[in-house]
Image: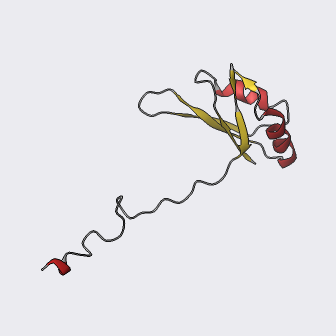
Amino acid sequence: MNIFVAKLNYDTQEHELQEVFEQFGEVSSVKIVIDKVSGRSKGFGFVEMDNDDEAQSAINGLNETELGGRTIVVKEARPKEERGGNGGRHGGDRNRNFNNRY
């Protein structure tokens, strides 16, 4: 199960997050999301645990607990929603009214 962890202290390291989750079972991977420009943590990340029962125990046991001086949010990660590919805020075909103007 892929687990979303939010409201992380910006100084929290991946190995620290892994140690916390390992209290509930085997951790497959840990990834704290880093801002490309600043190189700093964005304050959230993902933990993957292969055993769904252990993962659910981690969610139940760690959600709204303190880590690094902050109360973290822990929940099952959901797939990223598809974003529309319409190329702009107005959407659709930009030239759709072109022929109607002349």
Q: Is residue 27 left or right of residue 88?
A: right
Residue shown at 64% from the left, 24% from the top: 13
Q: How many marks?
A: 0
Q: Is residue 63 left or right of residue 68?
A: right
The colour scheme applied to this rendered structure is: secondary structure
Closest to the observer, 51 or 58 = 58
Q: Is residue 95 above or below residue 21?
A: below
Whole-percent x, y for residue 5 in the image: 68, 37
| The C terminus sits in image quarter | bottom left
Q: Is residue 34 above or below residue 92?
A: above
Residue shown at 81% from the left, 43% from the top: 55
Whole-percent x, y for residue 99 in the image: 18, 80
Closest to the observer, 58 or 71 = 71
Residue shown at 68% from the left, 48% from the top: 77
Q: Quadrant of residue 89?
A: bottom left
Q: Residue furthest front?
A: 101
